[in-house]
């Protein structure tokens, strides 16, 4: 056990720093930590607590395997320790490398030195995590002292299981401080809370859960940090999706250490959380990749309308450039609805017809196509022309091109590769079509600063969805109704159910087989799709690792 000498006290003040780190911005992340430490010092705190792997940002992926990167990160932490010599202790996550290997670690800094290094014991290796590939598993560390308080620090996954917290309690820990880099997924907050309450009940110790906030590639960290007292009572909670500093006071009582009651932040419901996750993810993806403005094709349909709205909320409507690209099949209603959305948002809208380029390509291909009838090829030409024109605008003016495809379409390949799939980020990539409708209804019901209220016209929500690539086209010509398609996709993708199990839920076997065959055959498209934020339990990305070529299925062979 290591520790710091301090006069005996019956109180302990902790500053919780729920902050947004940028992967690789070691100096910037350290500067944020120092600013939080300064605020903690002014508030008379004994310690400031930052999230897991904060100095590097999270997840670092293979960047952490570069020895030079790890050395730089450890050097930043050493410099932080020297800068924080007079004042509260600091807990901050970062990598640790020595002769025994590379570790996901948590550093305790005080008195101008690194006083303690705790190394993660349980390494997650599922969903979006592959930490066993990157780090060594360390032995369970004992508690450490800050003043006279014995603190146990299970790092993120260490607290999702009983072994580490119970070992810390048995070796004298009086509180549990849990630093986290826990990415958002729908319903994740309830799961986290259930695990942490279980740890509190098992150990009888109060627990502080500090989570990172902010977007990183296809993940978004939702914050929502909190403090639990023995027995599981919630003493304090921080907002979701916001940077936040909060001070919590612990007092030693006859029943042990107790946290004083603090403010309980409002946590939105699941679908509102999804919306906030997409807004924050897009804002951070743009900021962290150096873009300040976005571009999208606004078709008059609900998908592009919700993407434009998310972008306007994330970036400001003046930074969202909407383009209508009509063809001979574009209806007057679509033109009117696209204009209505842009006007309601206050976003600039330009019109760039594709009829001329389409005619030129048709003429160019005519000698080779000869007398073959028009088919999907001609439909895809329209989509690819739109992709070409939008990418040209992106290149010329430096806007990030946003794609507007939803999870239902991406799953079954109802999208054109190098066409409407072209772009740099896909805000609704993990949103089913039915979820898109829910989000549109929720966003329309919101007040507040402009753009506000009903920004998506009811006709956009009510009209049957259509790609408008041929006369009178409807999505239902090619796909089952979304009320049927989406539950089948969720059962297969998120629940891993077999064909027989999905059919047992009341779906026709032929429909299920057709949908799953489309999912399998379009894996090659998904591999080439832009990243998009993960909001479900399983998104197409790091937690969906299926082969492009596979001869196995359980839908074409069963009777």
Image (cartoon, grey):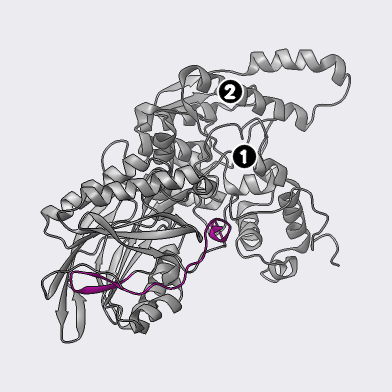
Quadrant holding the C terminus: bottom right
Toward which corner of the image does residue 167 lie, by quadrant?
Answer: bottom left
| Residue 410 visible within the image | yes
Q: Which residue is mark 2?
A: 326
Which residue sits at x=67%, y=30%? 469
Q: Observer-nearest residue: 307 or 136?
A: 136
Q: Was residue 146 drawn as part of the magenta stretch in this picture?
A: yes
In the figure, residue 355 lies in which quadrant? top right
| Mark with earlier residue (1, 2) | 2
Span highlighted in magenta in the image: 127-152
Q: Which residue is mark 1?
A: 529
Left or right, residue 270 beside residue 422: left
In the picture, the disc for residue 392 is none
Q: Which residue is drawn at the image coordinates 63% and 35% (left, top)?
A: 467
Viewer-side residue, 103 vs 262: 103
Q: Is residue 160 magenta?
A: no
- Residue at image x 43%, y 32%? 341
Residue toward you, 458 or 429: 429
Instruction: Give neighbour class at mark 1: few <14, some 14-19, many 20+ (Cα, 10 Å).
Output: many
Drawn side of residue 453 relative to residue 103, left or right: left
| Image depth: mark 1 or mark 2 in front | 1
Residue 432 at x, y = what percent? 56, 51
| Residue depicted at x 47% and y 68% | 138
Q: Position of residue 215 (x, y in %)?
A: 42, 46
Any part of residue 269 in sight: no
Circle 1 SS class: loop
Q: Is residue 149 above or below residue 547?
A: below
Mark 2 burial class by Cα count in 10 Å: few <14, some 14-19, many 20+ = many
Real-space Cα distance between discs 1 and 2? 24 Å
């Amino acid at each position: 056990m290591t520790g710091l000498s301090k006069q005996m006290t019956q109180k302990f003040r902790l500053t919780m720093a729920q902050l947004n780190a940028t992967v690789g911005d070691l100096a910037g992340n350290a500067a944020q930590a120092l600013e939080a430490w300064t605020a903690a010092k002014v508030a008379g705190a004994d310690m400031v607590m930052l999230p897991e792997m904060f100095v590097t940002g999270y997840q670092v992926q293979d960047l952490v395997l570069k020895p030079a990167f790890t050395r730089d990160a450890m050097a930043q932490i050493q410099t932080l320790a020297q800068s924080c010599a007079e004042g509260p202790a600091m807990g901050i996550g970062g990598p640790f490398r020595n002769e025994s290997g590379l570790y996901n670690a948590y550093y305790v800094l005080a008195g101008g030195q690194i006083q303690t290094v705790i190394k993660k014991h349980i390494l997650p290796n599922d969903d979006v995590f592959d930490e066993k590939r990157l780090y060594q598993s360390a032995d369970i560390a004992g508690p450490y002292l800050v003043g006279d308080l014995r603190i146990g620090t299970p790092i993120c996954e260490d607290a999702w299981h009983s072994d580490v917290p119970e070992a810390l309690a048995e070796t004298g820990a009086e509180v549990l401080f849990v630093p986290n880099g826990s990415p958002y997924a729908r319903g994740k907050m309830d799961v986290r809370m259930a695990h942490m309450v279980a740890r509190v009940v098992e150990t009888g110790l109060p627990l502080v859960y500090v989570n990172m906030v902010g977007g990183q590639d296809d993940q978004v960290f939702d914050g929502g940090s909190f403090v639990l007292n023995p027995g599981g009572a919630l003493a304090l909670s921080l907002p979701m999706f916001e940077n936040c500093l909060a001070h919590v006071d612990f007092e030693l009582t006859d029943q042990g250490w107790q946290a004083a009651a603090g403010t309980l932040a409002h946590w939105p419901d699941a679908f509102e959380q999804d919306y906030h996750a997409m807004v924050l993810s897009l804002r951070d993806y743009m900021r962290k990749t150096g873009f300040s403005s976005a571009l999208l094709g606004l078709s008059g349909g609900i998908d592009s309308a919700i993407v434009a709205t998310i972008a306007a909320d994330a970036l400001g409507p003046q930074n969202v450039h909407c383009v209508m690209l009509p063809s001979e099949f574009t209806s007057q209603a679509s033109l009117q609805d696209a204009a209505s959305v842009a006007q309601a948002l206050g976003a600039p809208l330009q019109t760039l017809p594709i009829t001329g380029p389409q005619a030129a390509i048709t003429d160019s291909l005519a000698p080779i196509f000869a007398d073959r009838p028009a088919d999907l090829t001609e439909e895809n030409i329209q989509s690819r022309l739109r992709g070409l024109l939008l990418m040209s605008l992106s290149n010329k003016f430096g806007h990030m091109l946003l794609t507007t495809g939803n999870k239902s379409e991406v799953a079954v390949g109802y999208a054109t590769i190098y066409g409407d799939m072209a772009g740099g980020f896909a805000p609704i990539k993990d949103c089913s079509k039915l979820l898109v409708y829910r989000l549109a209804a929720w966003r329309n019901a919101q007040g507040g600063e402009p753009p506000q209220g009903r920004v998506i016209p009811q006709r956009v929500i009510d009209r049957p969805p259509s790609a408008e690539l041929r006369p009178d086209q409807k999505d239902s010509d090619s796909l089952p109704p979304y009320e049927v398609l989406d539950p089948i996709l969720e059962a297969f993708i998120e629940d891993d159910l077999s064909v027989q199990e999905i059919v047992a839920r009341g779906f026709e076997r032929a429909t299920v087989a057709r949908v799953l065959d489309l999912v399998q055959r379009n894996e090659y498209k998904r591999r080439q799709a832009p990243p998009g934020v993960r909001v479900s339990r399983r998104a197409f990305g790091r937690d969906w690792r299926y082969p492009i070529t596979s001869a196995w299925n359980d839908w074409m062979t069963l009777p």
